[in-house]
Amino acid sequence: MPFSTAGWRFPVLLLLCFVLGIALRPVSLSGDVVEYATDTVAMAAHGTPDIRLDDIARTRRLAPPLTEPLNQLEQGMRRGDRELYAAFVRGRDDKVYPIHFFGYPALAAVPFLALDALGIDPLRAFQVVNYAAVLVLALALRRFFRSDVKAALALLLFFACGGGLYINWTSPECVSAAGLLAALLFLLSGAPLAAGLLGGVAALQNPTIVFFFAFGPLIKLWLEYRREASFGANLKAQLTPANLTGLAAGLAVFALPVLFNFYQYGVPNIIAKKFSDPHFVGMARLVSFFFDLNQGMILAIPGVAVLLAAWGWSRRAAGTLALCLLFTLALALPALAVQNWNSGAAGVMRYAFWAAMPLLLALLLRVRERARWPVPLVAGLALVQAAAMAHAVSYTYVQMSPLARLAMRVAPQWYHPEPEIFAERMGHNDDYIRPAQAYAFRAGAMSKTLYFPAEPASIAQLCGSDGALAPDNAYVDSAYGWRYIDGPVRCMHSGLRQRTLQAAQFRDRDGIALDAGWSGVEFNGGAWNGAWSQGARSRLVLAPAAGADAGARPASLTLLGQYLDGNRRTRVRIDGVDLGWQELDRPVVLALPAGPAGAPVTIELEHEAPHAPGPGDTRALAFFLREVRLHEDPSLAHR
């Protein structure tokens, strides 16, 4: 079909296909559906994003599977709780809002009302918004390639790189991915205002996409750079009123959730404050983001990655790929801090799906250079990507993928998933990873086991209460203190005893004395039995063991508790030896310095930011000590 800027057949045909797609495919109540569905109901009902009891009741009728979390939210609102069901918060006006900005629900509110008036399930409004975003992407592809056929093939590639997995979801992943790719295409084909606005819309729910406003212009500058002209001249050619207006308009759209968050919560992003932790940013998650065999980006774009790696590259093409790789890395890094790493996904991780769009752009730029696309290349890419999508829909995010299971059966020593992925998929649940639990995958004689060395209960599950792990196991250290054992688990008799000192011992000074810098011992139930530090420094003294263990000195200890907001670490000194800053809300093993048998052990804690928790409590608190574990684990000495 020849290209025509005034042609109507391509968009009309696509629109008909999309209407048919919506009619034939049910809406998928997936992702952050509780927040987005409830907020869409709110926006449609009263035009504001605050959640009211009537909105909860309506959402419950429309989506019965959401009854339990909605009940929790309703009960908390009726009680006037400050801390509500995890995905909702109170703003400065004491109204209740979802933690996610209301941009996506605002887009869905109009089709919600229209579908509701027609007697059609109004939650299909999310499909309408998602398909509309993909239709805009199709128009951007058509402008980019100046060919209906090539635009249609490129759109199929988008679907085969994850778009087909997320287009029916009640979450904005498809809008973010399609909006980001369309913004890049429009920017590179001379439509900066459309590019800027789409970049802003794509970033409304996934703020990391703001990097588009840096990397998009850089890629454009690189592609249009004239070597015969100076850098200043090339830069001036890009700083046109149209380009600057487009970027400014997009940044204004991006700023909406930032301003809303500042107004309501006093921070630029409430999700980053409540549900992210820089501690998680590291190589384990970075590798997982791109290469994990359960949800890594490679699962969505294997064919694209092979072509990008194998294609002969000119200087300009290599530079473009480098910029696209850096753009993808910039999109990935902030996502590494999320607390819930094994979150709902359709094969590929949600963040990895839209973060792959710059790499898809790099391939589209290469194929645009060819007047005719080689049939073997197109067919091979289609087959590989179709296989990737078939694999992605064959399992859920609480199951190991077929590819991951194969890797652990054939070569377990080469594959060690990020601990949360392994633990939750072995347990087939979306839950917290628990240091007291051991997790195992077994396939015949081969096996893989994940455990927490600092947690005696984890080792007891593997070796019994009087056993210990043998030093000749095939140990592989993972992230956050977790450790894998590849192959069969070998145990030995430990001959050692463990002691755990808790609130009752604190109160009775039974084996431990909370000396200076502590508030009174509290018994508030569960994890809140213990004692708060008070002031900048605290000291506790461990008495020598009595009875059968008299004279014995533990080789290591673990201090466990939780921090008051604003505190993340504590400086620890044991018998005068400085062990540095430690995160004591995690089961960290602290080696005791050598000392005489039968002598007390003095532990001094320096707190990071002690402060009063509120106007009704003037104590300078920092760390709540829940328990002290005295132990010696032979497996800790295997290195």
Image (spheres, rainbow, N blue to C red):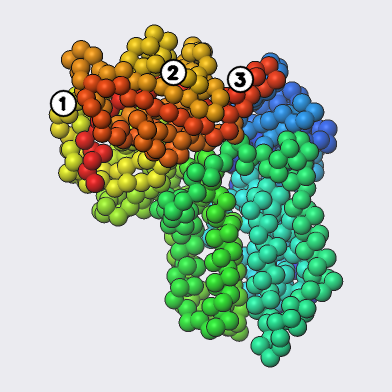
How many numbered discs? 3
> Do the CB atoms of the residues marked 3 and 1 lie less than 8 Å apart?
no
Point out the frontmost of discs 2 and 1: 2
Residue pointed to by mark 1? 495
Q: Locate residue 494 relative to residue 456 in the image: left or right.
A: left
Image position, residue 113 (x, y; %): 79, 39
Point out the frontmost of discs 2 and 3: 2
Using the numbered discs, state the Cα–Cα distance from disc 2 to disc 3 in whole angstroms: 17 Å
Q: Is residue 566 above or below residue 8?
A: above
Q: Earlier in the sequence, mark 3 or mark 1?
A: 1
Residue pointed to by mark 2? 515
Q: Amino acid at mark 3?
A: Arg
Q: At 54% across and 60% down in the image, what residue appears?
A: 329
Image position, residue 585 (x, y; %): 46, 31
Q: Amino acid at mark 1?
A: Gly
Q: Residue furthest top?
A: 508
Q: Which mark is residue 63?
A: none
Mark 1 lies on a secondary structure that is loop
Q: At 49% across and 62% down in the image, what residue appears?
A: 301
Residue pointed to by mark 3? 619
Q: Amino acid at mark 2?
A: Asp
Q: Locate residue 348 relative to residue 459 in the image: left or right.
A: right
Q: Is residue 551 above or below residue 43?
A: above
Using the numbered discs, state the Cα–Cα distance from disc 2 to disc 1 in whole angstroms: 32 Å
- Front-most of 420 and 599? 599
Q: Locate residue 425 relative to residue 95 in the image: left or right.
A: left
Place residue 273 in its image quadrant: top right
Image position, residue 455 (x, y; %): 33, 30
Q: Quadrant of the N terminus?
A: bottom right
Q: At 63% across and 57% down in the image, what residue appears?
A: 177
Mark 3 lies on a secondary structure that is loop
Estimate how packed mark 2 is, as few (under 14), some (14 to 19) or many (20 or more) residues with alpha carbons within 10 Å.
some
